[in-house]
Amino acid sequence: MAGNIRLEVVTPEKAVVDEDVQIVVAPGSLGEFGVLIGHTPFLTTLKMGTLRYKDASDRERFVFLSGGFAEALPDKVTVLAESAERRSDIDIERARSALERAQKRLAQKQDDVDYARARAALERAMHRLRALEANK
Amino acid sequence: MATLKDVKTKINAVKKTKQITKAMNMVAASRLRGAQGRMEAFRPYARKFADVLGSLSEKAGEEASPLLMPRDEVKKVHMILCTSDRGLCGGFNSNLNQKAKAFVADQKDRNVDVSFTAFGKKGRDWCRKNRITIADEYLGVVGGKVEFNVASNAGLKLIHAFLNEEYDEVYVLYSEFQGIARQIPMIEQLLPIPPIEAEDGAPADENEPYLAEHITEPSADELLDEMLPRNVYVQIFSALLETSTSEHAARMTAMNNATKACDDMIENLTMIYNKARQAAITGELMDIVGGAEALKG
């Protein structure tokens, strides 16, 4: 291995991750992609999902992203996300109840705006839970 | 001439007021720190965003997205007015409302319809009083913990309205935080998105080859389509952060002044109190001396 690459995950509210990592795997909108040091400059949008990375001490970590975009440079990956949470920060109870609420709301037919909103909420909750359940 | 007791009551009342203004000053100071921290935290995101968007749009040009295209005829404009929910912050809200008033008058002269989205109660009340159409109102946002999804929901709504030609131009009026004692009302155009420049700091020619060797996925145009609406959200979010920070700073200054004014008043009243007390003592002495003289006969 040639060395570590810098990973920065920032949201409008705070910087979530800022550390040297071995590999980053991110949910690009056209498919998941992995980045190692020395990557060609690359810019892409991200879809909602889980970002994985292996930190300097070989531990695999997970971050939930609600979409955004990422820029990879040879020595650095920057992820700009609307919201991002490390797995340890995800509130299981909240995600579960959000999931239930969204499912209930989808069950009763409503106008388009509410429908779209409930769909988005459902998706967010599912991805949060998936990030939690990913093998540890 | 006020009696001793009246003056004493008045002094106590002013002291109570001073306690309140002082407490509000300290609350505002700690909120200000929080708000400034949030602005600080937003900065890396905003900077990176501006960099990437600047270089993307340089490549794309005006035709790339309907969000960039100025309309030939402007008939309906929309304004997002950011004010605070609560008063007691000096001229903060009235400065903003004055600016809004000038803007409305300007548009009326050009025969343009104006409508508003109000963030904050003070601005909403002002719109109501002046019978200006309010499309939307959001209370309890400015001054608290501003969340990004509030900005993005509002932004999404405006973008839809803009694309449906309900509005031809969208502006935001907010208070820029320039320092504890300086908050300036500012108007910025949101839609159509004005030509974007990469954040200054780096010279232009250094920015230029920024994306030249980037692979983009999907294509640069599609990427731009994704990013332009986000730019609107980012702008609204930053306006809300600036206004919140300004509000706390304005309140802190106003309350500081009020506390000082209380001190002055207490000093004056104490002076009056002492004078009255002395006058009363002198009066009593005169009575005693007069009485003694009379007894001597």
Image (cartoon, rainbow, N blue to C red):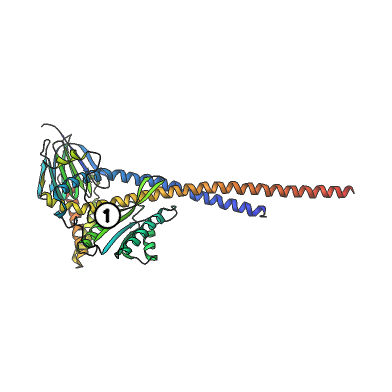
Q: Is residue B60 above or below residue A119?
A: above
In what quadrant of the picture does the N terminus of chain B appear? bottom right
**x, y percentage for residue B113?**
29, 65
Out of B48 and A7, give the one closest to the viewer.
B48
**x, y percentage for residue B56?**
16, 47
Q: Is residue A17 above or below residue B140?
A: above
* Viewer can see residue B8: yes
* Viewer can see residue A86: no
The residue depicted at 69 percent of the width and 48 percent of the height is: B277
Q: Is residue A9 above or below residue B98?
A: above
Count of numbered circles on the image: 1
Image quadrant of residue B140?
bottom left
Q: Residue furthest right?
A: B297
Dot 1: chain letter: B
Is residue B15 toward the left or the right of residue B284 in the image? Answer: left
**x, y percentage for residue A67?**
18, 51
Q: Dot 1 lies on which element?
A: strand
Image quadrant of residue B201?
top left
**x, y percentage for residue B238?**
29, 50
Out of A52 and B224, give the one closest to the viewer.
B224
The residue depicted at 22 percent of the width and 56 percent of the height is: B192
Q: Check disc 1: other Cα within 10 Å, few if <14, some if 14-19, many if 20+.
A: some
Please name the amino acid that badge 1 sits on.
Gln
Q: Residue furthest front?
A: B109
* Residue at the disc numbered 1: B189
Q: Residue furthest top?
A: A2
Is residue B239 toward the left or the right of residue A30 in the image? Answer: right
The residue depicted at 12 percent of the width and 40 percent of the height is: A41
